[in-house]
Image (tube, rainbow, N blue to C red):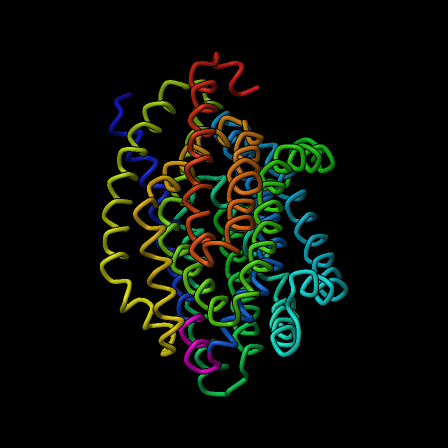
Amino acid sequence: MTAGPALRRIVGFALPLTAANLLQQGYLLVDGIVVGHYVGVEGLAAVGASGPLFYLLNAMFIGLGTAFTIRLAHLRGARQDGERRGVVLSLGLLTVVWSVGCILLVTVLAGPTLTLMGIEGRLAEDCARFIGALSLGFPGIFGSAAVSAYLRGLGDSRAAMWVQGFGSIVNVVLVLLFVAVLDLGIAGAALATAVAATAALVAGLVHSARIYPVPRVGERPAVRRELVDAVRLGFPLASQHIILAVGIMVLVWIIQAFGPVVLAAFTIVSRIEQFTAILFLDFSGAVTAFTAQNLGAGNAERTRRGLWQTLGLTVGLTVALAGVVLLARGPIAALFTDDPATRELTERYILIIYPFFALYTVMVVLHGHLNGARRTTAPLICTVIAFVLVQIPFAYLLHGVFGIEAVMWAVVAGWTAGLTYSVWCLRRVLFAQPAEVVS
């Protein structure tokens, strides 16, 4: 097998997901633009302040869902389709329990969490209104993520693209209707996401049942075993997101002291960063599935070739994309707000972090290979080093002296530390014996 087909396989897996996620992140950009122009700087600040709490719940579930994707990819590579029923039932059980539990958690803990972050007064009321309305869509949000994990595990990223893309298009239409037309404010933006996610879940379930029906015969499904194994494998991934979410809460606590304008700029740059990172996160997910399938089939050498070629491609794409963002930083900031101070701060943030964006993209692609090799603890430790030990202390200790720019440069410092550790971990995995890698 030559190297070319390996890269084509990874690209073929990543691009459909990228198309779907660009639509998804596109709706987030539209959401931010609509909120910025129809609700104002205070609305953007509320979205940014409440974002870490939702990210904590959503990203933890995605971390666990990735474990099911890896498991399904291994079964597909090993041609053991009979065991898929137990995996699906376990994933469904986790989704239901998680959705109900998160609704209860938000109801009880949203207020105290915002207080701990230093969010008070009108801003706290707006945040509570936003997250409360969003919680109505938790079954749809987590359910559609579970369907996506299932389809990606079976290697059908195109189907996952259509499911996510459908939800994103519905979301764009609804946020314009609810906020710009019906003037429902910050709650309208949250309700748009809730309704769109529910629609995506229904579409995904119908498609999956028709194209990939769960086997009805075979051995008794080992639901408990699959659930325990998924939690064991996915816990490091989920823990990574827990650390990130808590760290973002700390950053919001640091940033909110500078006022709503700075918090609004932070929200804008976060949306832009999420949008531009999509392609590389999808390449990371593609490398995860590609590595898992080929290690399941006993072909470790092909995973190495695919990784090297993916790294070369993503670095070139990063340089081009970062250049576009840097050159267009003025018009990009103007899309979100008419406030001169918020626009100037957004441009300054972009000018600091985007020349170093390749550090981030290489790091996440390496994490994809490590996850596919079942070394899910390595990205977790990387997050602890980059975010907890470097970025947050850097921002906290220096923001009093250098102001908000210390928070911006802390991002670059964290990426540098994370990439250094990821390269060290990769060397250990690449030179391990095949049996050791998949154990």
* Position of 167 relative to 84 (above/below): below
Q: Which residues are magenta?
A: 31-40
Q: Residue at x 53, y 42 (%)?
A: 387
In this picture, residue 416 sits left or right of residue 132: left
Single out the residue that lies furthest toward the bottom. 182
Is residue 321 part of the magenta span, yes or no? no
Whether residue 204 appears in this view of the structure is yes
> In the image, residue 314 lies at what x, y percent?
30, 39
> In the image, residue 436 lies at what x, y percent?
53, 15
The N terminus: image quadrant: top left
* Position of 210 relative to 315 (above/below): below
* Position of 104 relative to 398 (above/below): below
> In the image, residue 417 lies at what x, y percent?
46, 35
Given residues 300 and 106, the one toward you in this image is 106
Given residues 36 and 63, the one toward you in this image is 36
In this picture, residue 170 sits left or right of residue 317: right
Q: Residue at x 35, y 76 (%)?
A: 340
Q: Main secondary structure of the magenta part?
A: helix
* Position of 113 relative to 154 (above/below): below
